[in-house]
Amino acid sequence: MVAIVRTSTIIGIDAQPIEVEVELATGLPMMAIIGLGDTAVHEARYRIQSALRASTIEVPHKKVTVNLAPAALRKDGASLDLPMAMGLLIAIGAVDGEVLDRAMIIGELALSGALRPVRGVLPIAALARRMGLTRIVVPAPNGAEARAIGGLEVLAPASITAFDANRGVYVAGD
């Protein structure tokens, strides 16, 4: 099964859509991130692993492949941490992917699992609305910025563990 999460990257002042595809496979435990990411994107594997460990989320010992599509589009910064982590959580069955099917997700992870603010939330929220999505998940400090774009349910958790699996929503951090 391949889990798919929607996110975006900023190129200049414009938001460009990105699909994060996460696949689990048998093999040596490792995480490979492919799709023309910069150093911060490739370092995400360490932030994700630490954040999940700190949040007591058990990840199976499998080979994890994360594809950032379209592959030819340059991606930079740590704002793809949360979408990659959520894709992994969907792939392992810890989160119901249907809950986030109509959502755009963006956020940087701290090693503790806390979410750090990111740049470009306003154009990303506008892109999400143009794409017909109904939700956007952003770090708590970016909640007000995302709410400036009407027509979206804004979920602004303080940490990756703020996801309420029973209700299928993030508990607001702001």
Image (spheres, rainbow, N blue to C red):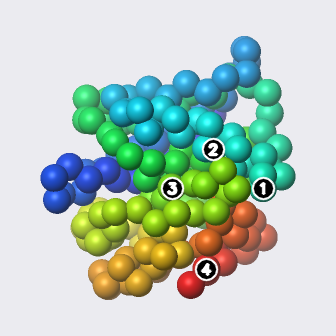
Q: Residue furthest top?
A: 27
88 up-or-down from 161: above or below: above
Marks 2 and 4, how far apart in space? 20 Å
Residue 94 position in % (x across, y down): 75, 51
For residue 108, the mark is 3
Q: Give the mark nearest the N terminus, 2 or 1.
A: 2
For residue 48, the mark is 2
What amino acid is found at the position of numbered circle 1 in the picture?
Ser
Q: Give the mark nearest the N terminus, 2 or 4.
A: 2
Q: Give the mark nearest the N terminus, 1 or 3.
A: 1
- For label 1, the SS is loop
Marks 2 and 1, how far apart in space? 10 Å
Q: Give the mark nearest the N terminus, 4 or 1.
A: 1
Residue 80 position in % (x across, y down): 45, 48
> In the image, what residue occupies the spot 82% across and 44% down?
58
Q: Quadrant of residue 2?
A: top right
Camera sees residue 97: no
Read off the residue under disc 1.
55
Quadrant of image for the N terminus = top right
The crowding category of the residue bearing disc 2, from other C-alpha atoms within 10 Å (few below 14, some 14 to 19, many at least 20), is many
What amino acid is found at the position of numbered circle 2 in the picture?
Ile
> In the image, what residue occupies the spot 66% across and 78% down?
171
For residue 173, the mark is 4
Q: Nearer the viewer, residue 123 or 129?
A: 123
Q: Quadrant of residue 25?
A: top right
